[in-house]
Image (tube, rainbow, N blue to C red):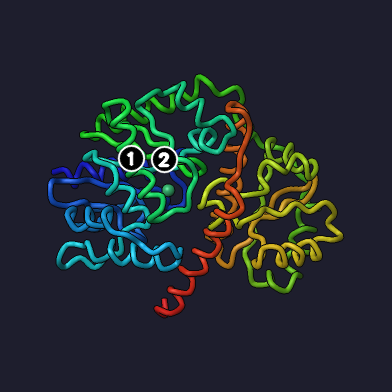
Amino acid sequence: MSIKELVKISRFYGKDPSFVLAGGGNTSYKDYKYLYVKASGFSLFSIGEGGFVKLDRSALSRIWEKEYPSDVDLREKQALKDLTDSRADGETKRPSVEALLHAALPQKYIVHTHPAMVNGLTCSKDGCQIAEKLFGSRCMWIPSVSPGYVLAKAIKTQLAEHEEKYNLLPDIILLENHGMFVGAETTREIKAIHNYVISTLKKHIIRKPDFSLVRTSKEKIEKVYRRLKNYSAFKDSYITSENNTEINAAIRNSTSFEKVHSSYTPDHTLYAGPEMLFVEDLESIEQDIDKYRQRNKCYPKVIAVKMTGVFAIGSRENASHIAMLFFLNALKIAVYAESFGGYKFMDKEQIDFIKNWEVEKFRSKVSLGK
Ligand SMILES: [Zn+2]
């Protein structure tokens, strides 16, 4: 019955774009022997029982005792192998990259999401202090570290310290520059905790993002499309554009665009690029893209043109829509962060780690011929 409950709660949050975007987020359920965690490649909104991987909890627990090499690549590879090896007999699906985090938390049900409002807090300057003030010992704040094994291990260690200090388990885990984990013994409690977090934050939000539509100059937008389509690397790409009151305010100049130009969370790096490009003058857009490529070793996925609009570029239609979704999400986070001392991006090393991680994933895909 509990897997059915897991499917229900997964779809409930998976369908709500204020909690997850583009198939993000993941969930799990534990019985005394196994952890059932979302498999890689499945989306929460449509997941069924077959979308979860069954992992042996005693095999997982050995990961915490093991010493891993300090070399990042070796460490992540070995931890990933141990995670994969912990699958129950006959399991072939790949566990989500965040499966180890689910294993680190003791509660029966775990729901992990990236709500824009919560990330307004986790991606802000005063987030840690405000979280403590708002949620007290129910909440545990995890400072931003590289995803994968290091993050899971940090949670495991901090959890032990938290229990020792407060004599209770936190049920709200906030990951700096990432999102939230909620843990409980029933799915009813899971919902109650989410409602509590969101309603508490709502009371402290001083300004909401204004996504009301604005009139745009079709001519100016088309001019940008033409320039982008004529740029050799983008000739087969899909481009989407968007404008609203909040975007209008952000694209007034490079200073107003500052709050969205870098990455708030790993997903922003993956789907919208390590940097979002601001183009001051359309006449130099090609040179700006070239310079971006030199700086970041990749082409921009999101380009804002001063006083005109924001354009998302992808090799497939879906990819350009997702890049746009993450740009809009970054804008929301920036606005919500105003209520928590102002925005704070991931630091450069972490963005670089994600970039290289992506390369690794890409390489593995190529090598697998997928
Ligand atoms: Zn996540």
Residue 237 relative to residue 285: left or right: left
Q: Residue 111: where, in percent of width, then height? A: 33, 41
Residue 29 relative to residue 193: left or right: left
Q: Residues within 10 Å of mark 1 (few under 14, many from 20)?
A: some
| Amino acid residing under circle 1 | Phe
User: Taking 360 as reference, is 354 above or below it?
Assistant: above
Residue depicted at 24% across the width and 58% down the height: 53
Instruction: Answer yes or no: is residue 54 visible.
Output: no
Say which element carries label 1. Answer: helix
User: Taking 157 as reference, is 311 above or below it?
Assistant: below
Instruction: Answer yes or no: is residue 176 visible.
Output: yes
Q: Residue 343: where, in percent of width, then height? A: 62, 36
Q: Which residue is mark 2?
A: 16
Q: Residue 102: where, in percent of width, then height? A: 30, 47
| Viewer-nearest residue: 5 or 70 | 70
Residue depicted at 52% across the width and 69% down the height: 359
Q: Which residue is mark 1?
A: 12
Contact between labelled residues 1 and 2, with CB atoms less than 8 Å apart:
yes
